[in-house]
Amino acid sequence: MIPLTRYKCKANTSGSISLEAALIFPWVVMITLILLLFALFVSQKSLLYYSSTVTAERTAFGWSNSAKDTHTGAYPEGKYDGLYWRLTEDSLVQGLFGLVSENREVSAGINSESEGSNGSSAVDKLRKYSVEPASSHKVGNGEMRYENIGIQREVAVELSSSWNVKPLNWLRGRGEAESEVSALIVEPAEFLRTFDLVRYYAAKMKGAKEGESEYRDKAGGVLRKRKP
C-alpha cells in the first residue's frame, strides 16, 4: 500500500490589510466627501432661506412708509408718503372706478449690481430692500416681486445660490440651493377704510340717477386728478 501524505495549509494573512484598505478606503473617502458637501449644501440653503425670510418680512413691514429704516422700521418724525400713495403708486383701490394701474405686479432683481432707491413707488421700495441680501448677506442672486390683487398684497423673494455642487447633481439633478419666501402686507386700519370706501361708492353707484357706469367714470375722473 502507498502511504497517504497529509499536507497542512497555513493561512497566509500577510497583505490582507493593504488589500482591504485598497478596496474600502476609496469608498470611505468618497462617502465622507459627499457628506461634507451635503452639509455645506444644507448650510447654504439655510442661509438662503434666512436671508429670503428676513428680506420679505422687512419689506412687508416697511411697505406703508418708504422712509422706514430697512433694519429697525423706524422713520423720522413727520416723514410720511403722500396721502394718496395707495391710489397712485400702490393702487390698493384700483379697479373700483375702472382705473388702469401699471403696478399690478412689479419686480426687482437681486444681484451684485443692485442699487437702493428712496422713492415711494412699488419698484423703488423693492429696490431699497433688495440691497440687503445682495450686498450684506451675499448669499446668491434672485428676484423680488410685489403683487397686488386688491384684497391681498404680497411680497415674494426668490434666491438661488451661485455655488454649484457638482457631485449633488447626480442625486438631485441640480447642485445650487434655492429658496422662495413670501410675506403678506398687512394694514388692518387701511383695509377697513378701503372696505368702507367700496361699500359707500357701491351704494352710491347703485342709486345714481345717471346710471352706475356713468357715475363710476365720473368718480374715477375725480380720483385721476389726484395723481401727480
Image: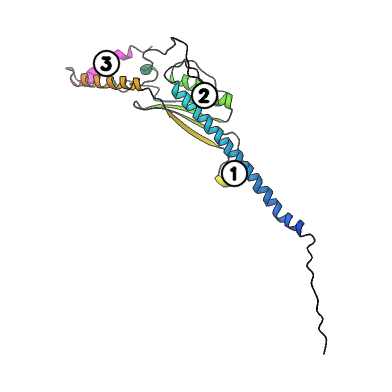
* Distance in Å between CA atoms under marks 1 and 3: 59 Å
- As helix, strand or loop, the secondary structure at mark 1 comes to helix
x, y (%) of residue 71? 51, 21
Residue drawn at (79%, 69%) of the image: 10
What's the amino acid at mark 3? Answer: Ala
Instruction: Tell me how many marks there are.
Output: 3
Up/down of 165 relative to 222, above or below: below
Name the residue furthest bottom.
1
Up/down of 131 relative to 9, above or below: above
Up/down of 123 relative to 172, above or below: above
* Distance in Å between CA atoms under marks 1 and 2: 29 Å
Label ID, residue 130: 2
Q: Nearer the viewer, residue 104 or 120?
A: 120
- Membership of 224 in magenta stretch: yes
Nearer mark to the viewer, of 2 and 3: 2
Task: Determine the image quadrant of residue 91.
Answer: top left
